[in-house]
Image: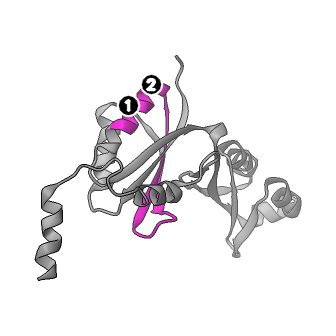
Amino acid sequence: MLKQEFTITVYTENQIGLLNRIAIIFSRRKINIESMNTSPSEIEGIHRFTIVINEMEEVVKKLCRQIEKQVEVLKAYYNQNDEIVWQELALYKVSTDEIVEKVKVERLLRKYGARAVVIRKDYTVFETTGHREETDGLLSVLEPYGLIEFVRSARVAIINESRGFHEKLKEFEQTEPGENLIENEYLDKKDEVFSM
């Protein structure tokens, strides 16, 4: 089996130290993280990690199971690129004199879906979003024209064939009493104590 790019999506509680513990799971296995993003999710109090790696699918399955063993982790999914909608943001700082004199800026912006976010006498900053190939395409065009700085964000992704984790959480919360639950004699006694 060949290595390929996978996007791992992890839903977690927002706890201090969790990012470090998740990163250790990858470093112990000598797996390089291509990009990692963490942000709030569609559910209040739940955060979402988006992690991109190049690995074999069997290894990715094991990684997800290992990540889910963390107490604060609610669920971990993995997907190939055709199973998700994803984007990255890129910023390019170029010399204003160079870019204005030698390039038809409007045509360049249109072609790469970019826009100018800062225009100063000494430099201009362009922004674009897209897949890695698209942001790299604009990078290669701008390099000969006084590229001063370049930065690309981590991936953000949404799973195609998913009702979302929010719906799965609702289903779990609506489970009928006694359905998939273990009876516990102490749970009923708690109600008696509070009713006194």
Magenta span contains residue 55: yes
The span picked out in magenta is 36-65
The quadrant in which residue 31 appears is top left
Residue at which label 2 appears: 58
State left or right for residue 39 relative to residue 156.
left
Q: Secondary structure at mark 2?
A: helix
Residue 103 percent coordinates (x, y): 85, 57
State left or right for residue 50 relative to residue 148.
left
Residue 128 percent coordinates (x, y): 70, 59
Q: Nearer the viewer, residue 191 or 121?
A: 191
Q: Nearer the viewer, residue 163 or 145?
A: 163
Residue at which label 1 appears: 62
The quadrant the C terminus occupies is bottom left
The residues bearing labels 2 and 1 have C-alpha atoms spaced at a distance of 6 Å
Q: Secondary structure at mark 1?
A: helix
* Type of the residue with mark 1: Lys
Magenta span contains residue 195: no
